[in-house]
Amino acid sequence: MEVMLEDNGLKELFDQEIAKTTISDALILALWNKCVAKVRWIILKGFETMWKKLTDFYQNNSDQRKLALKDKLRKIKMEKGETIPKCLTKFPECHDELGSVGITVARDDMVSIALLGLPKS
């Protein structure tokens, strides 16, 4: 925020000690109000920019997370020496993770994916 104020030539307003005086001159009051309005606009614009960057960042991460979870579900396979119940517990965990990011997987799809993850013999 400080950089934005400095870029717009307003940082010195915050760095100076301003004495509390009554302003009787209409011109000085108008200039003061103009500076205050400009500072408010810059601050609000800064917050708007920050909010947009944050939402873009987390939206991208959310999309990446969804893809990673879908890939994780697809890659669940029974490992050598693993029991069937142990392997099958991975599916509800992954299903819950997908649900937490807004993806619903139908039960019949989960069953099909689980069967594909089991060994052929």
Image (cartoon, rainbow, N blue to C red):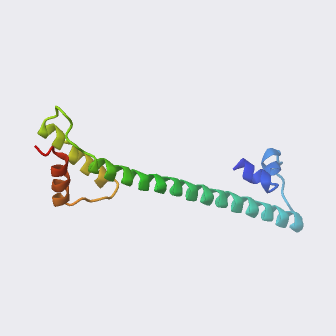
Viewed as shown, does residue 92 lie left or right of 46? left
Question: Residue 21, percent across and down?
Answer: 84, 53
The residue at the far left in this view is 121
Q: Residue at x 19, y 47 (%)?
A: 117
The correct choice, above or below, for 104 with respect to 65 in the image is below
Question: Residue 41, percent across and down?
Answer: 70, 63
Q: Which residue is drawn at 82% across and 61% down?
A: 32
Question: Residue 31, percent across and down?
Answer: 84, 64
For the residue pair 11 and 52, the one nearer the viewer reads as 52
For the residue pair 53 and 8, the one nearer the viewer reads as 53
The residue at the far top in this view is 81
For the residue pair 59 and 115, the one nearer the viewer reads as 115
The correct choice, above or below, for 58 with respect to 77 in the image is below
Q: Quadrant of residue 83?
A: top left
Viewed as shown, does residue 15 lie left or right of 91? right
The correct choice, above or below, for 74 with respect to 85 in the image is below
Q: Which residue is drawn at 12% across and 39% down?
A: 85
